[in-house]
């Protein structure tokens, strides 16, 4: 009997092998968290209009922007200093200054840890989005969710370990490349679910005109396909694409039973739906995705990625506010604020926030000076991300930008450090979570990264 035959006979196929591996629960150290939900603001959310309060921008509004030295911009020359269109106030016992654009998240400030000194190695959307997802500005590297899937697997054999909920309006730059498994086994790529579509998972069920398909014929077809795939694999050892396809077929069969239940929010209370903003057009789409994310997390999905913003031309439907920050960020921020806060509150009320990391990020920030008269250009030198739950210390801020919110000043960090911190809370040492590829032991954090100890509870 070959090794592969043995595994098929004893484990019920590759899905059984994966299940046995993930149920082992092996981590490098005791974890504080079991799962992650990443909220990605595509297009570059402005730190100086949301979470990074700078009185100097109010004081110097309309004056020449002169931080000293040459100012590098993506597609413009420096305009004048531009204060935020929104006011600021303190929130929570921690007294965190936050913009009036995000009042609901302000109400969660005591649960959130802000990192104000993030930097990116690119001021171009595509490479910078790759970097925040995979740690590299180039394509071909596994997404963070794929690394978590590879390291920990799922807590539910009927659902994928890594699920992606895109913006209803389309994909971010790089499209599905943002949740690629790269060189990891292909089974670890993100599974795309369009939660608000009538057909949220393509080809999950037979077409309605295929009346010849019934439960008995489908079971027989699955059995035949399993035997054919087994024979096919025996002569193609190590081809992860074939293994991933078989695993996806097995998962699809289980999803036919589990997906309809998890995506059906009819059983949620009206109060919960209202909490997420499903009763308002501006918050309905992101709110539905956040609510579905909570349902996926409580059913054992390890990593859920929720996108806000789509790269679909003009008029802009993302956070890339070159023309008019007040107009564009008002729509995007209002659509994000209430659902994101609802997710934190809902997880907390269910006792899940203690072991669930909520990670809010964007590819880079925006400049404190104007582009034209109303917009802001790209700023890779300082921006804000935040985390909550899962061993994160709430009500704190780590690092800071300069007085302009232009460059990281205190404790500059890159995505490597945040990724290392998230893995640490999941019980994984980022230097030991490796995969050998082309003679190199690759990892999510490349050769960089330090756990940000100030964020840990």
Image (spheres, rainbow, N blue to C red):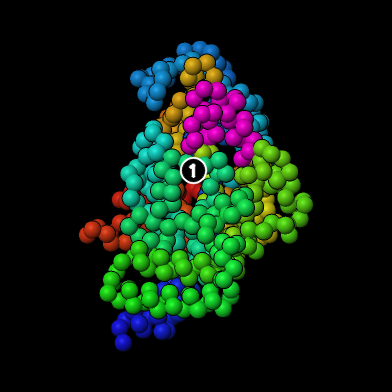
* x and y percentages locating residue 288 in the rendered image: 64, 49
Q: Nearer the viewer, residue 97 or 444?
A: 444
Magenta segment, which residues?
Answer: 311-336
Residue 199 at least partly seen = yes
Which one is nearer the viewer's eye here, 32 or 204? 204
Q: Quadrant of the N terminus?
A: bottom left
Quarter occupied by residue 205: bottom right
Q: Residue at x 28, y 71 (%)?
A: 236
Q: Is residue 322 above or below residue 182?
A: above
Q: Which residue is mark 1?
A: 171
Q: SS at mark 1?
A: loop
Residue sitting nearer the eye, 358 or 219: 219
Q: Residue at x 63, y 62 (%)?
A: 260
Does residue 45 sit above or below 419 in this rendering? above
> Residue 174, image x and y in percent?
41, 43
Residue at 35%, 82% (x, y): give it.
Answer: 5
Q: Is residue 339 at least partly visible in the picture?
A: no
Q: Position of residue 170 (x, y in %)?
A: 52, 42
Q: Is residue 323 magenta?
A: yes
Q: Is residue 147 magenta?
A: no
């Amino acid at each position: 009997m070959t090794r592969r035959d043995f595994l098929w006979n004893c484990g019920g196929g590759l899905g059984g092998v994966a299940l046995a591996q993930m149920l082992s629960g092996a981590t490098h150290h005791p974890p504080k968290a079991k799962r992650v939900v990443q909220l990605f603001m595509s297009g570059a959310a402005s730190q100086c209009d949301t979470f990074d309060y700078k009185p100097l921008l109010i004081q110097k509004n309309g004056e020449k922007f002169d931080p000293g030295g040459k100012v590098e911009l993506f597609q413009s020359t420096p305009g004048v200093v531009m204060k935020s269109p929104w006011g600021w106030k303190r929130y929570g016992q921690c007294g965190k200054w936050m913009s009036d654009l995000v009042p609901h998240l302000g109400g969660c400030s005591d649960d959130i840890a802000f990192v104000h000194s993030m930097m990116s190695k690119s001021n171009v959307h595509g490479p910078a989005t790759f970097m925040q997802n995979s740690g590299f500005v180039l394509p071909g590297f596994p997404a963070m969710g794929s690394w978590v899937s590879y390291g920990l697997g799922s807590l539910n054999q009927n659902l994928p370990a890594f699920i992606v909920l895109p913006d209803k309006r389309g994909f971010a730059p790089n499209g599905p490349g943002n949740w690629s498994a790269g060189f990891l086994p292909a089974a670890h790529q993100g599974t795309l679910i369009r939660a608000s579509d009538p057909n949220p998972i393509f080809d999950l069920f037979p077409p309605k005109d295929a009346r010849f398909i019934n439960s008995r014929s489908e079971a027989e077809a699955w059995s035949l396909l399993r035997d054919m795939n087994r024979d096919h694999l025996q002569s193609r050892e190590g081809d992860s694409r074939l293994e991933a396809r078989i695993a996806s077929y097995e998962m699809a069969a289980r999803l036919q039973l589990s997906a309809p239940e998890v995506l059906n929010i009819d059983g949620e209370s009206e109060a919960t739906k209202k909490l997420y903003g499903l009763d308002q057009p501006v918050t309905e789409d992101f709110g539905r995705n956040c609510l579905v994310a909570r349902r996926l997390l409580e059913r054992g999905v390890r990593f859920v990625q929720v996108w806000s913003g789509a790269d679909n031309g003009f008029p802009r439907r993302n956070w890339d506010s070159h023309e008019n920050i007040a107009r564009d960020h008002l729509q995007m921020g209002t659509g994000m604020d209430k659902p994101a806060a609802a997710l934190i509150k809902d997880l907390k009320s269910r006792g899940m926030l203690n072991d669930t990391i909520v990670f809010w990020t964007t590819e880079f920030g925006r400049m404190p000076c104007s582009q034209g008269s109303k917009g802001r250009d790209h700023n890779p030198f300082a921006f804000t991300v935040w985390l909550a739950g899962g061993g994160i210390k709430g009500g704190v801020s780590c690092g800071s930008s300069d007085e302009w919110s232009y460059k990281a000043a205190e404790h500059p960090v890159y995505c490597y450090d945040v990724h290392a911190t998230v893995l640490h809370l999941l019980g994984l040492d980022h230097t030991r979570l490796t995969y050998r590829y082309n003679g190199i032991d690759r990892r999510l954090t490349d050769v960089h990264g330090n756990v940000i100890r100030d964020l840990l509870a």
